[in-house]
Amino acid sequence: MADGAHAAAAGVEQLYAGAGQLSAGAQSLNQGLTTLEDGAYTLAEGNAKLANGAGTLSTGLGTLEAGAYSLSDGNAKLADGTGRLLSGSDSLNEGMGKLDAGAKTLSEGTTTLKTGASDLADGNGKLADGTATLASGNGEISAGADTMMERTSAMTPGQIFKSPAILALLIPVALLLIPLALLISARSRRSQH
């Protein structure tokens, strides 16, 4: 019986030791459950953040796609603007060439105008000289006509036409007609310009 008591005492000690271990295991299990619960909350928060990040990523991809379309549209507009700029540069170069040619033509025209003004002044001077000469000639013709009238007043018409004195009358009349024709020609040329 003493052996049985020893065995019972040893069994009780083992039971106490097992109960202690069981209690320690229960505490460890309880701590593990708490850690597991905390991990589940952390996992849930992480899943929520992951879902939120996926939404943000989806929005970002949409924005990126819209930006890519805007960039493509901008590139097309830039290419169009570059083409217009090149075309405008060509037109500007052509216009500069025409402006340069126009400036040369204007310079030549100004020179021609100065020459024409000088020629006109010379022509006016010569016309004035010619007018004075014509007036002087008219005076001489008038004096000559008076002299001829005095000489031919005693002649008959038949003698007048046969006489060399008729040339003295016809020559001054012809000389008067020449400047008159030149003046009419000059006026018609001036009216054409």
Image (tube, helix red, strand yellow):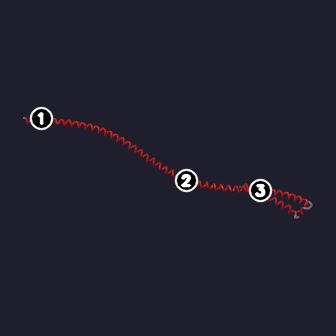
Label 2 crowd (10 A; few <14 / some 14-19 / many >=20): few
Quadrant of the rendered image containing residue 4: top left
Residue type at numbered disc 1: Ala
Give me the disc on residue 89: 2
Label placed on residue 1: none
Q: Decide if residue 145 is on the left or right side of residue 22.
A: right
> Residue 128: x percent and y percent?
79, 56
Q: Count residues near mark 3 (Cα–Cα under 10 Å), then give few for <14, some for 14-19, many for 20+.
A: few
Helix, strand or loop under label 3: helix
What residue sits 84% from the left and 57% below the top?
136
Q: Residue 172 placed where, x, y %?
A: 84, 60
User: Which residue is nearer to you in this view: 151 or 105?
Assistant: 105
Q: Which residue lies at the image location 35% right of the left edge and 40% below the top edge?
A: 49
- Which mark sits nearer the N-terminus, 1 or 2? 1
Q: Which residue is mark 3?
A: 125
Circle 1 packing at 10 Å, graded few (<14), some (14-19), many (20+), is few
Judged by depth in the image, the label closer to the viewer, 1 or 2, is 1
Quarter placement of the C terminus: bottom right
Amino acid type of the residue tagged 2 in the rendering: Ser
User: Given contact means CB atoms under 8 Å apart, are the residues at marks 1 and 2 in contact?
Assistant: no
Give the residue drawn at x 40%, y 44%: 60
Is residue 183 visible in the rendered image? The answer is no
Quick check: 40 left or right of 72? left
